[in-house]
Image: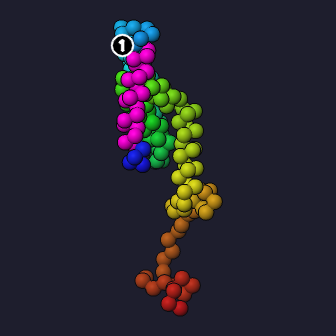
């Protein structure tokens, strides 16, 4: 994983420079800079709009006493998309705009969950086949206070 990140930190800036030079040679320096600025401003507006909607979803879920896991995932993706859109370059802008699509984020979440569950994670509330389990429990008072009932006592 560390090698992958290191490779990305080297490959992405090089690819961005190549694309910027090619676009600059086709449309000129001023137009290239204007396009970079336009994508940053447009991206910031879109991320802000979608982010505020996700914030409202989180607040609504919390007010109902629920964990806003889905809204948190989407908010994290939007934060990452915003970082990509504010980074100068057309490749990062492309990936940032792609992440703004809820459809893409949902597909990525499904892929990540299948990959995570498929690599041997069998803890928590998942069965061996990856399906979610749901259960309830009720505390039962013991007859004499600190002694377990005979059917649950492992010493008998």
Residue 67 at x, y = what percent? Answer: 46, 47
SS at badge 1: helix
Question: Where does label 1 land, which residue?
Answer: 33
Q: Does 11 sit left or right of 148 as displayed?
A: left
Q: Position of residue 154 (x, y in %)?
A: 51, 86
When asked about the image quadrant of residue 104, the answer is top right
Image point (57%, 44%), residue name: 111
The magenta stretch is 5-23
Give the residue at the far bottom of this rendering.
156
10 in the magenta segment: yes
103 lies left or right of 53: right
Q: Is residue 114 above or below residue 96?
A: below
**Is 11 above or below relative to 143?**
above
Q: Residue at x 57, y 84 (%)?
A: 151
- Tell whether 36 sits left or right of 120: left
* Left or right: where 148 falls relative to 3: right
Q: Residue at x 60, y 62 (%)?
A: 127
What is the tally of numbered marks visible in this picture? 1
Nearest the eye: 21 or 100 = 21
Within 10 Å of disc 1 (Cα), the crowding (few <14, some 14-19, many 20+) is: some
Residue 150 locus on image (x, y percent)? 54, 87
Our reading of the magenta stretch's main secondary structure is helix
Q: Taking the image as drawn, is residue 73 in sight?
A: yes
- The image quadrant that residue 102 belongs to is top right
Work out whether residue 111 or residue 25 is closer to the camera in this orientation and state it: 25
Where is residue 146 shown, x and y percent of the image?
42, 83
Judge by depth and name the residue closer to the eye, 146 or 70: 70
Q: Is residue 44 visible?
A: no
Looking at the image, which is closer to me, 116 or 92? 92
């Amino acid at each position: 994983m560390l090698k992958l990140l290191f490779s990305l930190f080297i490959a992405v800036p090089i690819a961005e420079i190549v694309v910027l030079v090619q676009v600059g040679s086709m449309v000129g320096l001023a137009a290239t800079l204007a396009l970079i600025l336009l994508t940053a401003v447009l991206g910031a507006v879109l991320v802000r709009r979608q982010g505020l909607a996700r914030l409202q979803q989180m607040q609504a879920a919390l007010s109902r006493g629920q964990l806003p896991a889905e809204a948190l995932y989407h908010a994290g993706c939007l934060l990452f998309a915003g970082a990509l859109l504010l980074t100068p370059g057309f490749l990062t802008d492309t990936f940032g705009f792609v992440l703004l699509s809820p459809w893409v984020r949902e597909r990525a979440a499904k892929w990540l969950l299948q990959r995570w569950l498929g690599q041997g994670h069998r803890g928590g509330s998942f069965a061996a086949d990856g399906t979610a389990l749901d259960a309830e429990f009720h505390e039962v008072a013991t007859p004499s206070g600190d002694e377990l009932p005979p059917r649950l006592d492992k010493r008998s």
